[in-house]
Image (cartoon, rainbow, N blue to C red):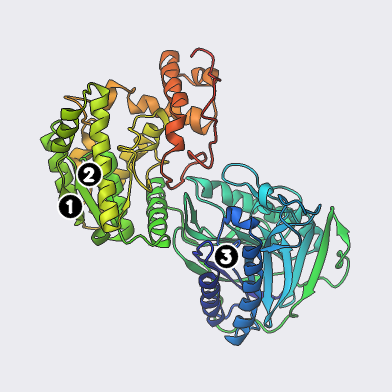
Amino acid sequence: MPTLRLALAQVNPTVGDLAGNAELVRRWTRRAADAGARLVAFPEMVLTGYPVEDLVFRRSFVAASRAALRSLAADLAADGLGDLPVVVGYLDADGPPQVSADAEPGRGARNAAAVLHGGTVVATYFKHHLPNYGVFDEDRYFVGGDTLTVVRVDGVDVALTICEDLWQAGGPFAVARQAGVGLVVTINGSPYELNKDDIRLPLVGRRAVEAGAAIAYVNMVGGQDELVFEGDSMVVAADGTLLARAPQFVEHLMVHDLDLPAAPESGTPESGELADGMRVARTRISDAGPAPAGPPAVGGLVEPVADEAEVWQALVLGLRDYVDKNRFPSVVLGLSGGIDSAVVAALAVDALGPQRVVGVSLPSQHSSEHSREDAAELAKRTGLDYRVEPIQPMVDTFLANMSLSGVSVENLQARVRGVILMALSNQEGHLVLTTGNKSELAVGYSTLYGDSVGGYNPVKDVWKTLIWRLAKWRNADAASRGETPPIPENSIGKPPSAELSPGQLDSDTLPDYTVLDPILIGYVDGDLGREGLVEAGHDPAVIDRVLRMVDTAEYKRRQSAPGTKISMKAFGRDRRLPITNRWREHGL
């Protein structure tokens, strides 16, 4: 039984940076070669970054991707790495875009994988199953492939698949069994969701049993706009047993020796023959050779962390990559002394370091002394650049020239704060972070062009009750390492308030968050209607009140800043509802 030393390169590409991504592949391929690997695989569309969205429709970009792939193959050979087969995801096309007037049936843009060897592209595979749900619109962009690519490496037949191929029964994995392969390599751009890792491992195990082959699953890591990819690459045996698992949220090279069945010489579909509705294309790269030298390579098993730790890492990585990949030097946010801005500030310091974070206290006549003290205490604990800009003189100037009262004055205060933050952004180049949580966003509890102002919202997809859990976890984590907890205890323990009027509390307008969040989770994330929420045990009167707020706030959400997705249904890319919409659940 041949032993194949496999390397999975869990790396962080950048969309559109073809030269930088190619260099990334070259650098990590060198590391794989130095580790004695005989096959190395990179994530889905690593060469272009993922997802590229409407860049697919630019023929210049498609041509650049294909040219970059050919150049990468040659450069790897020039680096002395030509003998090592490298699986690389990229954007290809065998026809015009499907949206063009000259589109051809069955041809178009392709989500593709290539095997680079000896300075050339020796094999290609086109993704078969195209996801068209949640954040994915691949039916809009790509044409699915109908051929399973099998390459023989060191005497082992290896099938190539891409991401969604794994999530659907049948198709490439059923064909892989008929083709008699020993290993299926699945390259992925699978975005993070809380607890998705608990679903992914059993799924990979089922596909391994379906294919009758080991599976090597390599996922990218890093942030791309609202999406964050956590890695969690793994190797699973043909019976579904987990053999190796990579850490989450960091770049990592996992090298593992696999004892795999030798490729059969007959009795399996040859190149060009049909199997279960798909063609099989075979390429021979190398026959069985000597076993890898030295001690066996063991990829190791990294256990997943607790939910709060996992979410915190996702939010930190998503924010860091959004700031760095878009070349912002620093960030600025309003520090109210409340829990939301405290959590965002702590996330920003963890992501960027205190020297790149500006926190601004923006007190009005309604700002309590303890809120000012809590903001200053957080700045002291984290070391961020702390400033105080009182807003009352500016608010008074408006009120001296306009007759405003009630909620108009409350919103005016929020908008003056937004103006100050944007002025600092324009003057000093910071990216403004907004701090509204998912609960507030759901019910419209924010001021347009006020507290909602900003270019990115790290907690956009975080329910208020989870905000508190994250704050407590982050402080406990710091204490466990002998560090100062970053978030003042007063910010965690006091009742939440916008402090826009005397004695104001969130509970004046909203149900208690422990009541509100379960209703919102059912309605927003679970698509439950009124009857389903009642059946779940929620108070019908509270349901009607909450759903009315959610439905009438769609226009606000449409204008909200992007933010890191951590749930199954984030506002924006996942949940797309019309603003002009008279449908209401029964009872409203």
Measuring 17% from the left and 52% from the top, which residue is drawn there? 386
Marks 2 and 1, the one that precedes in the sequence: 2
In the picture, the disc for residue 314 is: none
CB under 8 Å between discs 2 and 3 = no
Q: Quadrant of residue 394?
A: top left
Residue 410 position within the rendered picture, expressed as x and y whole percent measured from the top left: 24, 28
Q: Which residue is mark 1?
A: 386
Residue 243 position within the rendered picture, expressed as x and y whole percent measured from the top left: 58, 62
Q: Viewer-proximal residue, 37 or 163?
A: 163
Q: CA distance from mark 2 to mark 1?
A: 9 Å
Q: Residue furthest left?
A: 369
Q: CA distance from mark 3 to mark 1?
A: 39 Å
| Residue type beneath disc 3 | Val
| Residue type beneath disc 2 | Leu
- Left or right, residue 274 beside residue 284: right
What is the secondary structure assignment of the residue under circle 1? strand
Q: Quadrant of residue 144?
A: bottom right
What is the secondary structure assignment of the residue under circle 3? loop
Q: Which residue is mark 2?
A: 335
What is the secondary structure assignment of the residue under circle 2? loop
Q: Residue furthest front?
A: 401
Q: CA distance from mark 2 to mark 3?
A: 38 Å
In the rendered image, the vertical position of residue 451 relative to residue 487, given as above or below: above
In the rendered image, the vertical position of residue 30 relative to residue 281, given as above or below: below
Q: Which residue is mark 3?
A: 46
Q: Residues within 10 Å of mark 3 (few under 14, many from 20)?
A: many
Q: Viewer-proximal residue, 546 or 483?
A: 546
- Left or right, residue 467 beside residue 583: left
Frontmost of labels 3 and 1 is 1
Residue 435 position within the rendered picture, expressed as x and y whole percent measured from the top left: 32, 42
CB under 8 Å between discs 2 and 1 = yes
Q: Residues within 10 Å of mark 2 (few under 14, many from 20)?
A: many
